[in-house]
Amino acid sequence: ASKDTAENIIRDGSHFDEFGNLRPNIRYQAGEFEYIYQTDELGRLTNWDAEELHLTERTKRLPHDSKSPGKLSGDQAGHMAGDRFGGSPGKDNVVSQLRKVNLSDYKKLENQWAKALEEGKDVSVSVKLNYVGDSLRPDSFEVFYKIDGKPTFKNIPNN
């Protein structure tokens, strides 16, 4: 996320339209911390960036919106920024994920990030969500993260 476009980031909750859907072609902040998201021309979540990932101080999990866009049978509503990182429980942070992606592939990364944060390390995360055609369901997640400056890339298929 570049600093020069910081003034174009929506921070007042107006990233949703009157029907509760994400607005197209915007950048917005959501959740407890400075996590920045981006949508495409169809209002789909395409990027999530956390220059500094944090653990929430909340002890209770927030109830989340289980009606994620494009959800297929067997899918789960998966957080991009997990609840334990102060991620929003709404459609501005929740997408349709295969059960295996939500509970295993992506969760393993979240566990690494949480462990690093608990050890006092710096963690940054950037996720690009890829779609096929005009589908509302992500086809894959390109996850780029750094723990104390050491970069790692992981591609997670969602099909």
Image (cartoon, grey):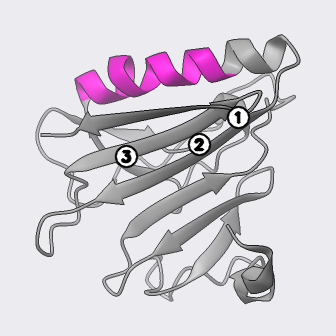
**Mark 3 surroundings: few (<14), some (14-19) or many (≥20) residues within 10 A:** some
Nearest to the observer: residue 66 or residue 34 = 34
In front here: 126 or 29?
126
Q: Which residue, given by chain and number where applicable, does mark 2 sit on?
A: 81
Disc 2 and disc 1 in contact, CB within 8 angstroms: yes
**Residue 119 placement: quadrant:** top right
Helix, strand or loop under label 2: loop
Q: Quadrant of the N terminus?
A: bottom right
Give the residue type at disc 3. Glu
Please name the amino acid that badge 1 sits on: Phe
Instruction: Judge the density around disc 1: few (<14), some (14-19), many (≥20) Cα neighbours within 10 Å.
Output: many
Circle 1 is placed at which residue position? 85
Mark 2 neighbour class, 10 Å CA radius: few under 14, some 14 to 19, many 20 or more: many
Q: Is residue 136 left or right of residue 129?
A: left
Q: Is residue 29 left or right of residue 104?
A: right
In the displayed structure, would residue 143 be above or below residue 131?
A: above
Quadrant of image for the C terminus: top left
Q: Is residue 140 visible?
A: yes
